[in-house]
Image: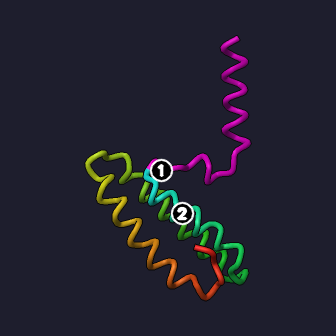
Amino acid sequence: MSARLAALAAFVIVAQPAAAQDKLGVAACDDVLAKYEACVATMPSGVQQVAKLGIEQMRATWKGLAANPQAVADLSDKCSQLGEGFKASLAQFNCKW
């Protein structure tokens, strides 16, 4: 029975979108990434790939920082600040922030 559960769990993880699998566990950062990812669809195609790469880099960097419990509070504050900056700079793409 445990082999079936393991197979089901693996299927559920693989079937989820990448963003759902890559939650950082820092609410402010997860919120910024989700909003930025939603915004990408409103961007011109030439900008989308650059934005996606930026999101991947942010996620990787933040994931590393989130692994350090002592850095989480500072990371949360930084993500909130970045979110406000993104809100202003991405307004040109009519993103809902």
Q: Is label 1 in a helix, a strand or a loop?
A: loop
In the image: residue 47, left or right of residue 77: right
Range covered by the magenta-colored residues: 1-25
Q: Is residue 34 above or below residue 20?
A: below
Question: Type of residue at label 1?
Answer: Leu
The picture places residue 16, in percent across and down from the top left corner, at 70, 45
In the picture, which quadrant includes the N terminus? top right
- Provide residue 61's location: percent of width, then percent of height: 42, 59
Residue density around tag 1, few if under 14, some if 14–19, many if 20 or more, within 10 Å: many
Q: Residues within 10 Å of mark 2 (few under 14, many from 20)?
A: many
Seen at 44% across and 59% down, the residue is: 28
Q: Which residue is mark 2?
A: 33
| Left or right: where 24 falls relative to 5 | left
Residue assigned mark 1? 24
**Residue at point 60% right, 46% down?**
21
Residue 3 is one of the magenta-drawn residues: yes
